[in-house]
Amino acid sequence: MKFAICGDSWWTSDLKFPECSFGEILAKQNNWDLVSLARGGCSNFAIALQVDTAIKLNVDFIIVGATGADRIELPIKHQTNLSFWDRVKNNFNWRGWMENGAISVYDKLRGLSNIEYQGLRDLSSQQFEASGHTIISDSLNNLAFIDVNFNDNRCHITTQQQEALKTYMLELYDHGIKFQYDRWIMSDACRRIVDSKIPFLFCPNVPVDCPEFQDYDWITKQNMLLYKDFNFEMFKFCEKNNDEPRFHYHPKDSGKPIADYFDKRIKETI
């Protein structure tokens, strides 16, 4: 069986800790093929693109973990597209913003390849092209407070974008609105899995008593990982330091019990 894992850092596998993530352990103990698509720091928009990739690859099973609403997508400024911004800035007015060509560098046909994976420790980084990325997908904190000169390939953010992002966080960001957007994104991603007829498990990242959980009411309990039954806080974490695995839980003490949980749930679902 070939199964895919979609999500953020909690769901990924770390190249520095081979065969320690629950996904790798699950694959090894069942002789299954793992398609690791999860990437640390990414948004629910990116996770929805991961789901589309898993469906396109026609895997036999999909595990999906939603992430928090504190993530964002930003266009990457390349030398080849700087003229886009210059044109809009030179012609900016309240009537003509759209008519003068609002920025659009995202290419729907490229799917998940729009988002940079290279230069990261996630196992998924080995699966995607090294160029042609159009958008940044990361947490607001990572982007707003990273040193823009730091050599991290995923942070193609200019000083101007960083300052604009901080202003957005202080003056324009509403967590409730963003949380609602993200719930709709993930609900629709699950609908696409249902339409594909691929068995799946979905972790909504919200407790059942949260009002936003209503956006997932249509998903059957068989396909749902309820917070009371599974959340990563149930397992042993690692100390936060430079050697912490990308997946955060303890590589020796927690990978196997998490894998065993998913082993049971997958076999109950298929």
Image: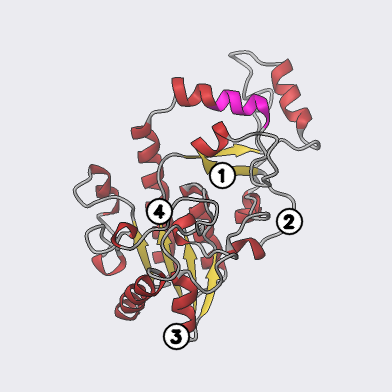
Q: How far apart are marks 1 and 2 (CA)?
A: 16 Å
Residue placed under numbered mark 3 in the picture: 30
Amino acid type at circle 3 is Asn
Q: Earlier in the sequence, mark 4 or mark 2?
A: 4
Circles 1 and 2 in contact, beta carbons < 8 Å: no
- Evaluate whether residue 1 shows in this view: no
Nearer mark to the viewer, of 3 and 4: 3
In magenta stretch: residue 57: no
Q: How far apart are marks 3 and 2 (CA)?
A: 32 Å
Q: How far apart are marks 4 and 1 (CA)?
A: 14 Å
Residue placed under numbered mark 1 in the picture: 137
> Where does the image place residue 111, in percent across and percent down from the top left?
61, 54
* Residue occupying the point 67% across, 44% down: 134
> Where does the image place residue 156, in percent across and percent down from the top left?
67, 39
Residue placed under numbered mark 4 in the picture: 66
Q: Distance between the residues labelled 3 and 1?
A: 33 Å
* Residue occupying the point 55% across, 32% down: 145
Q: Which of marks 3 and 2 is nearer the N terminus?
A: 3
Q: State the count of labels.
A: 4
Q: Which of marks 3 and 4 is nearer the N terminus?
A: 3
Amino acid type at circle 2 is Ala
